[in-house]
Image: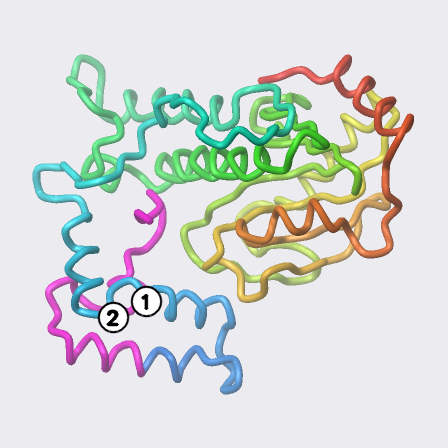
Amino acid sequence: MPDSPISATPYEVLGVNATVNDDELRKAYRRLLRETHPDTGGNTARFVAVQAAWERIGNPDDRAAYDRARPTISGTEAGFTWAPRARTQQQDTRPRARAYGHPGGWRRERYLSLMREWVGRGEPLDDPYDPTLVRSAPREIRHILADALAEEATARTLSALGIGYTVWHDVATGTPDEKIDHIVLGPTGLFAVLSEDYGQPVTLKRGEIVSDRHPLHELGLSAKVIAKATRVKFTALVIVLPDDALGDPLTVLGSIRGAATIVVRQSQLPALLRNGVPGARVVGGNELFDVRTRLQSAVRFV
């Protein structure tokens, strides 16, 4: 899997130069493993990130494969791009979740607009997803692309939930920045979901993600707009993060207006949505149909 546009490379996580020899790489890994280990007072998420970095470049063969796939000086890469995926014929014939809206669409457009502005008017921009160009852009621009990719990844996960689920992407609740990335309705409840990528392990404190914003609080405000317009109640407010950003697979942080607030690894999202929130009331039969009808008639997209 390629690096996120905003993430540190495995070398950066381990605090070494990409040209370091294998012995020095191993020494750096062992030192950080001791420093970040939870049993010695280290940060769990950072400990997981160090392990993930080592898994990618600790073995000489894996390291060589990673180095071949990294951006070269000319900006080309082997095997991946951050450009939108081309639509391909679905190989899996199992029924997919009903889905509406364009996941990651608004953030992709925002990224392209800011990238053109940053490069400069009149300057050629042959490939706005050129890895070397992306890596050289300001962090706020790269963060927008990283979030678009996160939304697209979550959308792929949600589509595999099956026909019992309905998903609305890029749901408007005010300004585009206030949108809900995904609203998911299924037998286990109604979920407002935000897909995020901070490019590094996150810290949780007092029921919130420590960042320059308050994402769970903001998601709660956006969910309130939809709840008021449709007279429905959300089961949970969920923030989905890359697996290496969280020390634990899933953490329930509290609640906002009766909805559980949860942060979850990307890989654990299907289990959360299929199993539901412990103690929450399930939604089924006529009620499920009624909630879907209300949302379908009221939801607007950015």
Q: Quadrant of the C terminus?
A: top right
Q: For mark 1, does the 10 Å Cα neighbourhood hold few (<14), some (14 to 19), or many (20 or more) residues?
A: few
* Image-based side of 271 in relation to 185, left or right: left
Rendered location of residue 291, percent (x, y): 84, 25
Q: Mark 2 sits on what residue?
A: 58
Name the residue rendered at 82%, 20% in the picture.
Answer: 229
Q: Secondary structure at mark 1?
A: helix
Colour mapping: rainbow
Q: Is residue 222 visible?
A: no
Give the spatial CA distance, label 2 vs label 1: 6 Å
Rendered location of residue 298, percent (x, y): 76, 15
Rendered location of residue 152, percent (x, y): 47, 33
Q: Quadrant of residue 90?
A: top left
Please, which residue is most extreme toward the right here? 286
Please, which residue is most extreme toward the bottom here? 40
* Image-based side of 200 in relation to 254, left or right: left
Number of dots carrying numbers: 2
Q: Secondary structure at mark 2?
A: loop
Rendered location of residue 233, percent (x, y): 85, 35
Say which amino acid is labelled 2: Gly
Q: Residue 42 bears which disc, if any?
A: none
Q: Are marks 2 and 1 in contact (CB under 8 Å)?
A: yes
* Image-based side of 4 in relation to 227, left or right: left
Q: Mark 1 sits on what residue?
A: 55
Name the residue rendered at 44%, 72% in the picture.
Answer: 47
Look at the image and give the residue range highlighted in magenta: 1-30
Instruction: Relative to 289, say whether 78 is above or below.
Output: below
